[in-house]
């Protein structure tokens, strides 16, 4: 699609704004997120950032946020580490400001949408995007459409009880912190051949494989695509992951499944823009 759209990724410390056209981010900029500021200041800074990057020359705005969203009305609820953004009518604010369509969802859904429209998810009618970072996020595509559920909270597999905690405790950066190391430090040590780090990633892969088996039981997707910072360590946890998935009882389901890390650049910006492009005529 040749529409010129805006993709926005709002984080607790940084907000990224990009102009997307012809499946490429043609211009982008990062701005600090004033996470402790008032709601109005954050909204005004976001509006100013859009003008700085794109003026008013675009078709629409898609936004990914770390929290719950009333997607129909574009209302944000309880964004992670941004305390003033509670019940914020972001869609109404930006549509009045720019007179363009605006769509908002959570960041895991944005990842899934980006992979479906621009990345490895293109061939699959049914797929799941899993983000592995400080938390465990999950976006669901069913029959080529994003399925978000109420308040964009469908796919919260990370909150399911698992062992002595939750799936997220064992399948995100929390797992490494519980072992006294950050995911990035463990990755660097694994790259250097450190045996303890390699064993840690093998165990991580086993836990992630169990999480994917939960996804297979509920959704039976054709593909599970992995994003987030920990996905870069895929070669170190792939064996443990695959061994666990191989124990899934339905052979046909597991044999058709593709599990791989995303290699799509700027996936957060592309996925946010995809929210608008999916509805464009």
Image (cartoon, grey):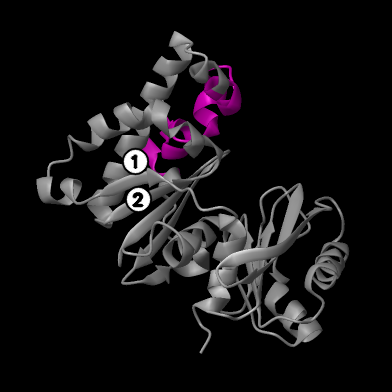
- Compared with residue 235, is residue 178 higher up or lower down, i.e. above or below? above
Is residue 263 found left or right of 4 in the rendered image? left
Count of numbered marks: 2
Residue that carries the numbered disc 1 in the rendered image: 211
Residue that carries the numbered disc 2 in the rendered image: 224
Determine the residue positioned at 34% across, 41% down: 211
Residue 77 image offset from top left, x and y in percent: 65, 63
Determine the residue positioned at 26% across, 56% down: 222
- Compared with residue 104, is residue 160 higher up or lower down, i.e. above or below? above
| Of callouts 2 and 1, the N-terminal one | 1
Whether residue 267 appears in magenta in the rendering, the answer is no
- Compared with residue 93, is residue 163 higher up or lower down, i.e. above or below? above
Is residue 167 found left or right of 33 in the rendered image? left
Residue 258 image offset from top left, x and y in percent: 28, 49
Is residue 16 found left or right of 215 in the rendered image? right
- Please report the bounds of the magenta region as a residue range: 159-187
- Compared with residue 219, is residue 171 higher up or lower down, i.e. above or below? above
Determine the residue positioned at 57% across, 63% down: 270
């Amino acid at each position: 699609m040749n529409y010129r759209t805006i993709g926005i990724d709002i984080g607790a410390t940084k907000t990224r704004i990009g102009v997307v056209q012809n499946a490429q981010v043609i211009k982008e900029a990062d701005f600090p997120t004033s996470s402790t500021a008032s709601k109005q200041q954050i909204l005004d800074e976001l509006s100013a950032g859009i003008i700085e990057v794109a003026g008013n020359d675009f078709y629409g705005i898609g936004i990914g946020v770390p929290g719950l969203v009333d997607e129909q009305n574009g209302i944000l609820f309880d964004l992670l580490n941004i305390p003033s953004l509670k019940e914020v009518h972001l869609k109404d604010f930006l549509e009045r400001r720019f007179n363009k369509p605006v769509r908002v969802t959570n960041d895991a859904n944005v990842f899934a949408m980006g992979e479906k429209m621009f990345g490895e998810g293109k061939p699959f009618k049914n797929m799941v995007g899993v983000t592995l970072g400080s938390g465990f996020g999950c976006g669901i595509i069913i029959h080529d459409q994003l399925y978000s559920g109420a308040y964009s909270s469908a796919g919260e597999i990370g909150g399911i009880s698992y062992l002595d905690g939750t799936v997220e405790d064992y399948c995100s950066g929390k797992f490494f912190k519980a072992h006294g190391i950050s995911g990035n430090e463990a990755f660097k040590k694994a790259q250097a051949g450190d045996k303890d780090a390699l064993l840690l990633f093998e165990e991580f892969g086993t836990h992630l494989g169990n999480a994917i088996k939960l996804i297979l039981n509920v959704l039976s997707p054709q593909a599970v695509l992995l994003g987030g910072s920990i996905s870069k360590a895929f070669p170190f946890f792939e064996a443990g992951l695959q061994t666990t998935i191989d124990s899934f009882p339905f052979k046909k389901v597991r044999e058709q499944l593709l599990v791989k890390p995303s290699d799509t650049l700027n996936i957060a910006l592309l996925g946010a823009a995809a929210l608008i492009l999916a509805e464009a005529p």
